Image (cartoon, rainbow, N blue to C red):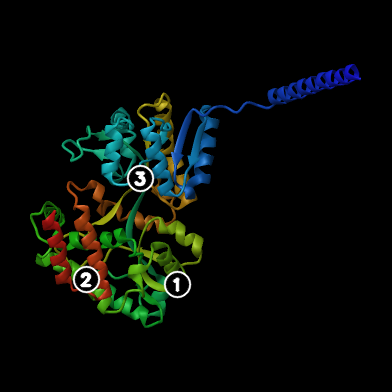
Amino acid sequence: MLFNFLTKVGTLFKQSIFYILIVSLIAGIAACARPVEKKADVVIWHWMTDRKKALSELARQYEQKTGQKVQFKLFAPSDVYSQKIQATAQANNLPDVFGVLGEKESFAIFIKAGHVLNLKSYMQADKKEWENKFFSKALLVNQFKRGNEFGVVPGIYGVPIDVSNEQMLYNKDLFVKAGLDPEAPPETFEEFILAAKKIKETGAQGFVSGWAETWMLNCMASNFAFNIMGEKKVMDTFRGKVPYTEADWIRVFALFKTMADEGVLAMGIVAMNNKDAEQNFANNRAGFAFNGSWCVNVYQGMNPDLNYGVMFMPRASDKYPMLIWGGAGSSLMVNAKSENKEKAVGFLKWLTDDTQQAYLAQKTNNLPANKNSISDISPILAEFVSGMEQATHPSLWPVHEKSTALDAFNIGLQSIVLGTKTPQQVAREVQEVKERL
């Protein structure tokens, strides 16, 4: 009996081994039959969800043209992306191409750690052929000049793939309803207040913006500051040479009090994030909005029939030019330690050429970084282009305000809008914070 049992066990074992071999053989044949996917020549990490489809299509076109496979990997939202980039940088395992989000100081840290390739020689080859394709303000965001405050070797360290700027938008249908000329938006602050009050009489809100996101509030205030006192005086304030209690700064703060006192601001504006503000404007509930050029794509998704225009910031003074925030919207950097850096540079040159830039602009409603591609963009995007020559940006400034003073400045503006503090009180408080630093 024991012999028969052992014989059966042996037979079953042999059958099991035979079965495993057959399955393995079949699996092996199937694996050989499947085409082996080509390994990517260039791997790019990005955060741009709105551009995922367009970038994938361009990668397909590039492989068809050159035989080189480019793989875009999306990590979103942007804060998740930034955390991943920082972690992989620490592990020295960055992809061939990536982007650095945040302040210029963060960008400088990546460069000084040897993670970012200096592209100056590529940009300036062949009589600056590549460099000359871009809006000058777009490249400046990725450029470090000699003697920069971060101690970075002079050079160009990023490739802009689009540009943006922040301007005023106005609803043409509400203009008509209020008896205003939809082709003649206000040019001065006083005209803006009068127009917003007329629009409010129709039952709509006068002006909306996402001022819970304090950078937008600060952006608008700095635009007015450049217009009222000039760039040098603003920078001297950051340097500590001009106090915030000076008359010109009081005048900047007072503009926000005027908007609040005249009742043209949307209810709850200081607690409103920009997405809600965009929804208000897109649904014809506000006559004016302050937003960036990315809003064209946003409004298209929210209300394709929205009838609106772009207007330059209404000036509060004739003494100095009005400057607006703007520059490179999204930029990509080449990993200086990558074995594929030459291939990466080659792809980025192709990506930012005229045809590809026009395709991206048409598919994503973002302003192209290539100035030769603007003839193919939508009329509303073209209205944003006109502001690029008046663009400035904190990343371009030679000096910056300390973060604690900046926080006091932004919170102070919110307090003025809420009516809990006067412009004079806020000026004193910001100056006191600055003097304690």
In the rendered image, which residue does mark 1 sit on?
A: 284
Residue reaching furthest to the left: 241
Q: Is residue 259 left or right of residue 200?
A: left
Mark 3 and mark 1 lie on one chain; the one further toward the N terminus is 3
Q: Nearer the viewer, mark 3 or mark 1?
A: 3
Q: Nearer the viewer, mark 2 or mark 3?
A: 3
Task: Say which element carries label 1.
Answer: loop
**x, y percentage for residue 237?**
12, 56
Amino acid found under the numbered disc labelled 3:
Leu
Quadrant in the picture for residue 436:
bottom left
Q: Which mark is residue 429?
A: none
Judge whether residue 334 can be spotted in this image: no
In the rendered image, which residue does mark 3 sit on?
A: 101
Amino acid found under the numbered disc labelled 2:
Leu
Task: Say which element carries label 2.
Answer: helix
**x, y percentage for residue 365?**
45, 53
In the rendered image, which residue does mark 2 sit on?
A: 255
Judge by depth and name the residue closer to the eye, 56 or 349: 56
